[in-house]
Image (cartoon, rainbow, N blue to C red):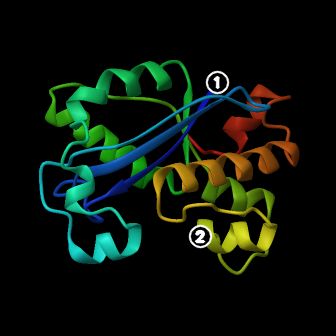
Amino acid sequence: MFSIIDIETTGQSYKNGKITEIAIYQHNGQEITDSYSTLINPEMDIPYFITELTGIDNHMVKSAPKFYQIAKKIVEMTMGRTFVAHNVSFDYKFIQEEYRRLGYDYHRKTMCTVKLSRKLLPGYQSYSLGKLCAQLGIEINGRHRAAGDALATAKLFNMLVDRSDLLGNPKAVNNYKLF
């Protein structure tokens, strides 16, 4: 039903940047059912400020698979599922661009936990993943790393599902205008 995803990248621009790490947690609406995580060789240098933020450096990704080598796995893990991420447009656009470079159109329904959090948990000062999780008591093991951030997003997603009628009422998802 859902693929909860986080990526790390070489920068903010999906047109010029590349993915350096991805984590996917498959979720059935109640719990995580499968997961996948890997570093990715971006075939370009990782800027110093990104290494400082994520801890991912050129040496770490040197022998990692290139995107085309894991592209099939990502398609399989997201096929027929809603693509869920915290600030979904960032992750989704990067992944779409990686597929576009391979000559493939990648399209999935998307759901943004930032938008959903603002609707279901109003009044928080910040909806950034780190600050929101801290305020909600969700521990993030590995901040600014794909697996840690994706798992925290999955925990946040569980909390949001518990506070909503998202799964009990299929029309509710459309009411949140998250796609």
Q: Where does the image place residue 67, in percent across and percent down from the top left? A: 24, 36
In the displayed structure, 49 sits above or below 10; it is: below
In the displayed structure, 155 sits above or below 104; it is: below
The tag on residue 36 is: none
Residue at the farthest bottom position: 125
Q: Where does the image place residue 57, in percent across and percent down from the top left? A: 26, 63
The tag on residue 128 is: 2
As helix, strand or loop, the secondary structure at mark 1 comes to loop
Q: Is residue 43 left or right of residue 9?
A: left
Q: Is residue 96 left or right of residue 119?
A: left
Using the rendered view, name the quadrant where residue 166 is placed: top right
- Crowding at label 2, few (<14), some or many (≥20) Cα neighbours within 10 Å? few
Q: Quadrant of the N terminus?
A: top right
Q: Where does the image place residue 134, in percent across and percent down from the top left? A: 73, 72
In the displayed structure, 33 sits above or below 141; it is: above
What amino acid is at disc 2? Ser
What amino acid is at disc 1? Met
As helix, strand or loop, the secondary structure at mark 2 comes to loop
Where is mark 1, residue-wise?
A: 1
Q: Measuring 27% from the left and 55% from the top, which residue is drawn there?
A: 60
Using the rendered view, name the quadrant where residue 16 is placed: bottom left
Image label count: 2
Q: Earlier in the sequence, mark 1 or mark 2?
A: 1
- Crowding at label 1, few (<14), some or many (≥20) Cα neighbours within 10 Å? few
